[in-house]
Amino acid sequence: MALVSWSMDYASAKSLQAYKWIYGELKGNVPFQYLAWVSYPVILVVFASLFCHLVSPQAIGSGIPELKTILRGVVLKEYLTLKAFIAKVIGLTASLGSGMPVGKEGPFVHIASICAAVLSRFMSIFSGAYENPYGYTDILTVGCAVGVGCCFGTPLGGVLFSIEVTSTYFAVRNYWRGYFAATFSAFIFRVLSVWNKDAVTITALFKTNFRMEFPFDLQELPAFALIGIFCGFMGAFFVYLNRQVVLFMRRPTALTRFLTKHRLIYPGAVTLIIATFTFPPGFGQFMAGELMPRECINSLFDNFTWTKISQYHPPPGLGRSAAWLHPHVSVFIILVLFFIMKFWMSAVSTTMPIPSGAFMPVFILGAAFGRLVGEIMATLFPNGILFDGIVYQILPGGYAVIGAAAMTGAVTHTVSTAVICFELTGQISHILPMMVAVILANMVAQCLQPSLYDSIIQVKKLPYLPELALGHYNIFVEDIMVRNVNFLSSHSTYRELNHLLDSTTLKTIPLVDSKESMILLGSIERTELQAVLDWWLSPERRMFETGQNSPSQGSKVSWESFTFVDEEGKEEGTDKIKVWDEEQLDKPIDMEQIRVDPSPFQLVERTSLHKTHTLFSLLGLSHAYVTSIGKLVGVVALKEVRSGFWFFFSLLSACLSSSVRSDAAGCDDLMAWAVVLSQGAS
């Protein structure tokens, strides 16, 4: 994965170099410059969208919400296949090379997880340990850590971020595995940069050089806290805006139907609009439009105080930071315009049907906001802050680092972004204010909106369990379970089995002792039952039964011993075959020839919703049978747990509202109705 990450960075960097070169070669001819500036990213984005649509539509988007659902125990088809890997790598490389405000981190977590899944299936040929579903989950968990680790060269933050984002419960046994794999991948990723002479030695991706002795004063902590609080509000608004754009595109209007029919128009139009606004000789000159994403980060983290720089006498070493200085426009206006424009651009860009993440765009937004606050502080205290006889100069670049960590933490609902920032910048000097800002940003954002990944899960309606809130009613499994259970008994006939397979789509079917006792004996996989039924009515068995090709005496005939072949022209009359089939369907099933799971997961009727939620999340269950003194009385699946949670949570809100709070009996009546309605809905 380190090799893949480095190759993608190399290819996208060369693409951006070509982009800037074409634009520079047309200097002096503004119309042709504009044409080149907008057409280059449009071509790449449209190519990425078309390639993913043709090869693997599952490669579109971030991939973390789907991976979070897969780690929860839900099977999502085609998300962890080699086709998705190829589409994601090529599509993401084209997206990054276009210069659009899209990120690499989310999609690369998906890419690394696909690599882990494919490698796991390959290794299962040599070792049965890889066929264990829990072992498969462990490998995917490590793949998530590797995805973040070699995306930015941040192994510590990568492991912690992967745990926070993808895992409801994390197995401690995977800690050392995740750290080992992530550290190795990050090391190789940085070594490849040195080998390519992108760096002199192994160093941080966005190396900063803030002073280590007193990089900030304690009197600056209120400013850092304000950064965290404001980033919390803005991070929540970013998630809200992103969700509203997606929901708008899903509304059944004439415009959305047209864009759905012509899939390439939407990404092309969005890219055209964004490229037009960032065109350097145009509006882009007021928002540092000529800077590519990584150039933005490097300039926002620099050691210069821009408000003290004269446009006519720039200091040596200013480099790309000169793009933030305009002879007639204040630095503050440029930073505000950059933040506002990039905010909606990033929120809209991440909704395009291409492989794209939001981590890096949000990271840049936070850095810009932090830099704005830092420049304001440097203006308010031009001579620095005096404390204990020592003057401490304001470092706007430090504020940018803190803003970047706080904003990404607010959008993703993680604290590990602080650790990622430490590793990205190579300095731990701002650890205290950064942790304060990130925690405050998380507190505010979590009160207002779900994380970006949970928001996408809700919009896509993926089968993922939400977190349980505190203070809910005592709700039990019997309140939400499905009572009308499809089952087989030890005395069932093949006709009943045939009807059950035709009328349901259940993947596992419970087996009871008899219809009267309903004692649960175990469960049987649908594929097993289908194979048994196919064998029972197969032409091969019919030939054996009718004596046309009987087996030798003393041999035991079972469905697993047959090889399904054509009858080679020895078909009997159609009517005779139908009569034979009808006779066979009325015979009882021989359960001795069927593999039965004798210990399916079971719950009792009075198991609380909280305990059910915990067990489903911890074990990755898709369903559980509900028993009473060994008798099968119902079944509860992931769907019922989710619907039961949301239904009762909304009802609880109603019970606690002012209109019902004064009437306890009314609340009890609502709860009684809730039980009836939930059973009816199930």
Image (cartoon, rainbow, N blue to C red):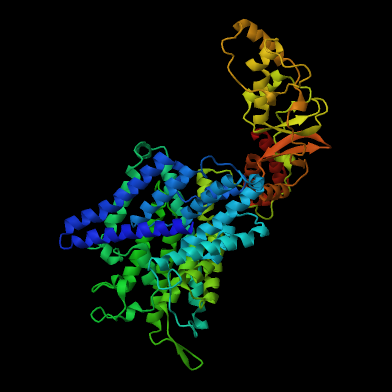
Q: Which residue occupies 73% across, 21% down?
A: 557
Classify residue 330 as left or right of residue 229.
left
Q: Is residue 598 above or below residue 248?
A: above
Classify residue 105 as left or right of residue 26.
right
Q: Quadrant of the C terminus?
A: top right
Q: Is residue 616 visible?
A: yes
The percent position of residue 436, horizontal first and vertical second, equals: 55, 72
Q: Which residue occupies 58% across, 17% down?
A: 566
Relative depth, front residue between 634 and 73: 73
Quarter of the rendering containing residue 304: bottom left
Identity of the residue furthest to the bottom in this view: 389
The percent position of residue 486, horizontal first and vertical second, equals: 70, 28
Q: Is residue 673 visible?
A: no
Q: Which residue occupies 51% across, 53% down?
A: 112
Quarter of the rendering containing residue 291: bottom left
The percent position of residue 347, horizontal first and vertical second, equals: 41, 55
Classify residue 197 as left or right of residue 219.
left
